[in-house]
Image (cartoon, rainbow, N blue to C red):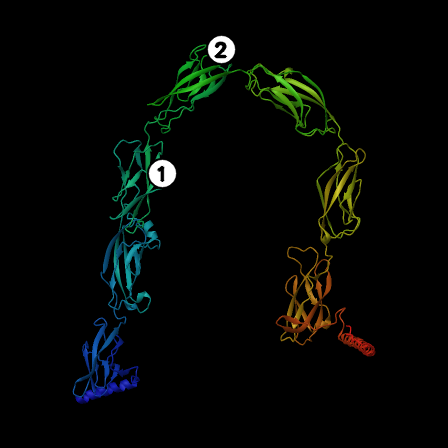
């Protein structure tokens, strides 16, 4: 046995050394509290750690929850002898102590914790092999009505114990549509939206589901699974809208009154009503049993029908299903008397009205429900005032309220007005309405002019429109201020152009003849005007208008010299800008109202491009036209009458010039600052733009570019960017520090094509932070270097001569001063 133990220790030591556990600090170390994690199910005889003993310790002792699995060798090797099972014990709490040769503890004991890590070695299992449940049709989708549950012995904090549910089979499957769904985490089974809408116990009262559960969250091919069966019974939905309710208005019964009810499929629902119409007064309520009440008497005349909703919610305030629409109709009772259309209803009747003719209809109103006995009205005349020439002159239709003349025609001289009292009644109420009937005169008199001829009237043709030129008068013997006596005047002859009109004074029937359109001597110098006076009311039978209702006058229009009139205010023509000189480009026309000849002339021809034939009005070009200088070109045309007062009028002539390609391309601007930094480190490029003055289509110009000189093509190249821009590039970097002039040929591609050569000056110069230091060249007016040196030397020479002269003068003055000082007794200072 001793030999066998030594052999076992030797094997462990060799395994320990072979696996690298001898590295200090990683798999071995001093005795201290430690925690180790080991996966369950691993092979036994695995070394965990080696503890190092400090003298006088010579061996180690292991105690605690070893379960006869964990061992320690006297060299300090901690190992286990059997595979661990997390489901049996997930944590082993051990203690290790160091002992001396006598077995006494010299260090420790220290706690050692072994955590058993989970591996997926357990299959999930449903708690039941079969589940049963029921669901109401039209239940809210997504609300679980049944739960399935499975368990897994693996660690729920790891994917090994995380379960995922799934519906595998639904029987029957109708149109390949799933009616049921399951929460993959909770196992809650609910209806889909389609299931909520289509489940019907009359068609399919039951369904069977096969549900699977997988561990590893259902995301691994190596997960374990289990299945169960679920039988579901579909029951009828009792959440249905009740039948429409009818309520009698103005009920005297104690309120509230239960009128209908709704019920959710399960107890505990919270009920409420929603007013669809947002009424200021909502006379309904619902209790938590689903009973609906009317809370106060209803009035059909205020509102004859109500529509609102009943809502059922769960304990969280979420709707359990769709709202139910509740309809309440208010039944009518006869609680409204008839009402008259106005305090007094007035009718008119002509004095020659025939028997039976309608005078007018009295239309009373009843607020009770239409087309019922409550609103059916009866009419009866109860009194006529006065009773002249007899009573009963009128009758009224019982149900229509139509008044008719009953016994004889009326005469205004007998009684001009009758008052009737009419009883209007429904089955319970009576109301008296009052009617006034006015007898009006018949139109048996025609208008008669005070005179038949108003003589002659002379007016100038430029008399203002709106002027009153004549007053006419007719009279009518019918009753004043009625349609029978009102007079309207019409011009019926002599004014085919409608130049005259007549306004009538409603109080005096005086007619005022006015000018409605300008008079014209040239078309109507003399007009024989005939008026007719008539009434708006038709004449009675047997009476006709005669000569007394007609009058006339003669209108003489005198001539006024008028200026010529152009046929249009603006004349317009279009020609090409390159038309030959002398080409007809347009013409104008005018005429003189008096028939005089007209002479045409131009005004405002600032460019001297046009001339006009003074007789025909034809316009010709007399100089080259240029669209770019101005288009449209606008001038004035003057038409002057020949003879008479030489009056004239002016019109506009607009000449639109169409473009021809007559402008060569050019640079869009002056490129003065084109430069490259010298020396070039790589070929460079510059961008420039071309343009011309011709008209372009919406696509714009399409220029082409090329180097104009073969000698420049070795150094430069040009490439087109678009229709207007190009890039000038160097072909190499070997350029001197100076200015280069590059000639570029630009073609516009027009019809005919035009081409021009432009020059770009490009400077190669040394560059600094502020840009290019250009080499100084000779500029006009600025001296060259040689000239500057010559000027400087000449200037110095002149200065030298001047200084020499000044010096000599000073010497001479000093000699004179010495002589004078010898002769004078006083020394004088030098003058400056």
Quadrant containing the C terminus is: bottom right
Disc 2 vs disc 1: Cβ atoms closer than 8 Å? Answer: no
Residue 316: horizontal and vertical position, in percent? 29, 52
Mark 1 sits on what residue? 280
How many residues crowd around disc 2 within 10 Å: few (fewer than 14), some, or many (20 or more)? few
Relative to residue 488, is residue 127 drawn left or right? Answer: left
Residue 736: horizontal and vertical position, in percent? 69, 76
Q: Residue furthest front?
A: 825
Residue 774 quadrant: bottom right
Residue 266 in the image: above or below residue 130: above
Would residue 246 be seen by someone viewing this image from the given angle? yes
Residue 49 quadrant: bottom left
Q: CA distance from mark 2 to mark 1?
A: 58 Å
Under circle 2, the secondary element is loop
Name the residue rendered at 22%, 62% in the picture.
127
Relative to residue 779, is residue 81 drawn left or right? Answer: left
- Count of numbered circles on the image: 2
Please give the label number shown on residue 263: none
Frontmost residue, 624 versus 455: 455
Q: Residue furthest bottom?
A: 3
Relative to residue 129, is residue 673 drawn left or right? Answer: right
Under circle 1, the secondary element is loop
Q: Nearer the viewer, mark 2 or mark 1?
A: 1
Residue 642: horizontal and vertical position, in percent? 80, 36
Give the mark, 2 or 1, whose residue is nearer the N terminus. 1
Mark 2 sits on what residue? 414
Q: Residue furthest top?
A: 389
Residue 632 in the image: above or below residue 100: above
Residue 779: horizontal and vertical position, in percent? 75, 69
Residue 590 quadrant: top right
Residue 111 in the image: above or below residue 306: below
Would residue 40 be seen by someone viewing this image from the given angle? no
């Amino acid at each position: 046995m001793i030999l066998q133990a030594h052999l076992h220790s030797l094997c462990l030591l060799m395994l320990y050394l072979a696996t690298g556990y001898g590295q200090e600090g990683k798999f071995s170390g001093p005795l201290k509290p430690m925690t180790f994690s080991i996966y369950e199910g691993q092979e036994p005889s695995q070394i965990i750690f080696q503890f190092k003993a400090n003298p006088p310790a010579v061996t180690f002792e292991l105690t605690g929850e070893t379960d006869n699995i964990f061992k320690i060798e006297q060299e300090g090797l901690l190992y286990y002898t059997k595979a661990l099972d997390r489901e049996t014990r997930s944590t082993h709490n051990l203690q290790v102590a160091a002992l001396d040769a006598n077995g006494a503890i010299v260090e420790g004991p220290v706690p050692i914790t072994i955590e058993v890590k989970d591996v997926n070695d357990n299959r999930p299992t449903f708690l039941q092999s079969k589940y049963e449940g029921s669901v109401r049709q039209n239940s809210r989708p997504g609300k679980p009505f049944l739960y399935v549950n499975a368990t897994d012995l693996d660690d729920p904090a790891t994917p090994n114990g995380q379960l995922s549910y799934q519906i595998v089979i639904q029987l029957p499957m109708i149109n390949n549509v799933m009616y049921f769904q399951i929460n993959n985490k909770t196992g809650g089974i609910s209806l889909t939206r389609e299931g909520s809408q289509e489940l019907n116990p009359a068609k399919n009262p039951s369904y069977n589901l096969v549900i699977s559960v997988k561990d590893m969250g259902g995301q691994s091919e190596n997960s374990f699974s289990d299945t169960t069966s679920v039988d579901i019974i579909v029951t009828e939905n009792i959440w249905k809208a009740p039948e429409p309710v009818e309520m009698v208005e103005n009920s005297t019964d104690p309120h509230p009154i239960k009128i209908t009810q709704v019920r959710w499929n399960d107890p505990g629902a919270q009920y409420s009503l929603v007013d669809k119409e947002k009424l200021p007064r909502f006379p309904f309520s619902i209790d938590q049993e689903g009973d609906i009440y009317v809370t106060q008497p209803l009035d059909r005349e205020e509102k004859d029908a109500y529509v609102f909703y009943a809502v059922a919610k769960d304990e969280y305030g979420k709707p359990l299903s769709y709202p139910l629409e509740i309809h309440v109709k208010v039944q009518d009772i006869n609680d409204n008397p008839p009402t008259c259309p106005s305090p007094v209803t007035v009718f008119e009747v002509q004095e020659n009205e025939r028997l039976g003719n309608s005078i007018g209809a009295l239309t009373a109103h009843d607020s009770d429900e239409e087309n019922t006995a409550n609103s059916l009205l009866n009419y009866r005349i109860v009194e006529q005032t006065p009773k002249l020439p007899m009573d009963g002159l009128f009758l009224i239709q019982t149900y229509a309220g139509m008044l008719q003349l009953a016994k004889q025609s009326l005469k205004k001289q007998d009684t001009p007005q009758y008052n009737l009292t009419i009883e209007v009644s429904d089955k319970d109420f009576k109301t008296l309405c009052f009617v006034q009937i006015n007898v009006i005169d018949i139109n048996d008199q025609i208008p008669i002019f005070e005179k038949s001829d108003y003589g002659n009237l002379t007016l100038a043709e430029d008399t203002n429109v709106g002027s009153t030129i004549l007053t006419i008068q007719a009279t009518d013997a019918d009753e004043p201020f009625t349609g029978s006596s009102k007079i309207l005047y019409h011009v019926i002859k002599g004014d085919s152009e409608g130049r005259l009109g007549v306004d009538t004074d409603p109080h005096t029937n005086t007619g005022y003849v006015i000018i409605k359109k300008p008079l014209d001597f040239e078309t109507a110098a003399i007009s024989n005007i005939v008026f007719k006076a008539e009434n708006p009311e038709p004449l009675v039978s047997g009476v006709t208008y005669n000569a007394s209702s007609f009058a006339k006058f003669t209108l003489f229009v005198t001539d006024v010299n008028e200026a010529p009139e152009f046929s249009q205010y603006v004349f317009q023509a279009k020609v090409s800008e390159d038309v030959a000189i002398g080409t007809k480009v347009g013409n104008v026309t005018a005429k003189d109202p008096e028939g005089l000849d007209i002479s045409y002339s131009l005004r405002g021809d600032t460019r001297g491009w046009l001339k006009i034939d003074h007789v025909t009005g034809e316009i010709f070009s007399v100089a080259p036209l240029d669209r770019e200088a101005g288009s449209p070109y606008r001038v004035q045309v003057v038409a002057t009458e020949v003879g008479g007062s030489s009056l004239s009028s002016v019109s506009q002539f607009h000449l639109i010039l169409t473009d021809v390609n007559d402008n060569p391309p050019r640079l869009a601007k002056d490129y003065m600052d084109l430069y490259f930094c010298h020396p070039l480190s790589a070929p460079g490029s510059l961008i420039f733009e071309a343009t011309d003055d011709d008209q372009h289509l919406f696509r714009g110009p399409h220029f082409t570019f090329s180097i104009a000189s073969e000698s420049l093509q070795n150094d430069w190249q040009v490439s087109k960017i678009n229709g207007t821009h190009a890039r000038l590039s160097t072909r190499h970097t070997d350029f001197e520090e100076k200015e280069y002039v590059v000639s570029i040929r630009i073609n516009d591609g027009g019809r005919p094509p035009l081409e021009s050569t432009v020059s770009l000056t490009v400077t190669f110069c040394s560059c600094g932070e502020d840009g290019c230091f250009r080499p100084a060249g000779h500029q006009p007016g600025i001296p060259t270097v040689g000239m500057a040196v010559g000027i400087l030397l000449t200037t110095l020479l002149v200065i030298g001569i001047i200084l020499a002269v000044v010096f000599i003068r000073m010497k001479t003055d000093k000699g004179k001063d010495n002589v004078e000082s010898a002769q004078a007794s006083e020394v004088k200072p030098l003058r400056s």
